[in-house]
Image (cartoon, grey):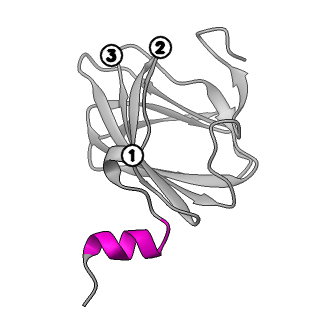
Amino acid sequence: MKTIKQHWIDTKRREVSDLEKSDRPWGRYEVLQDSPTHKVKCIWINPGARISYQRHKQRSEHWFVVKGSGEVTLDGKVSQIKAGQSVDFPVGFLHRIANTGTEEMIFIEVQTGTYFGEDDIERVEDDFGRA
């Protein structure tokens, strides 16, 4: 029987300790799993902050909120989201999340598609001058 570590090596997944962690002006994220078929991140959004209004050409995303509440914008439509709820963003759809609460918002992001690099982000609006 294979060990879990050997299974990860065989499937070309990287060790959790080798995965990316990044501070951003709106909060931070940590990659939990990175493979040729998907990427999983834990994302923290600071109170009052929001990510850029963006879309991706090569991946779709599924977000599951585990703490806090906020607003999600999907192709111009704004809706409320809170812990225990999720939302899907198909390839090419504009999207953003804003933490409208007073505590840190945390969600899990699952990306599926053909490419998961940070350069597959087209920013349409951004509070930090990156659009």
Q: Which residue is mark 3?
A: 47
| Residue 90 visible in this rendered orientation of the protein | no
Query: Which mark, by number, is residue 18?
Result: 1
> Image point 31% across, 35% down: which residue?
106
Could you say whether the residue bearing mark 3 is in a helix, strand or loop? loop
Magenta region: which residues? 4-12
Q: Which residue is mark 2?
A: 25
The answer to whether any part of residue 38 appears in the image is yes
Amino acid at pointer 2:
Pro
From the top left corner, tell me how far across and down residue 37 is, in percent: 57, 66
Secondary element type, mark 2 = loop
- Left of 94 or right of it: where is 110? left
Residue nearest the viewer, comparing 59 with 83: 59
Residue occupying image coordinates x 53% and y 24%: 51
At which x and y percent is residue 31? 41, 44
> Measuring 50% from the left and 67% from the top, which residue is drawn there?
12
Quarter of the picture containing the C terminus is top right
Sequence-earlier tag: 2 or 3: 2
Return the residue found at the far bottom. 1
Residue 128 spot, x, y in % from top left: 59, 9
Q: Nearer the viewer, mark 1 or mark 3?
A: 1
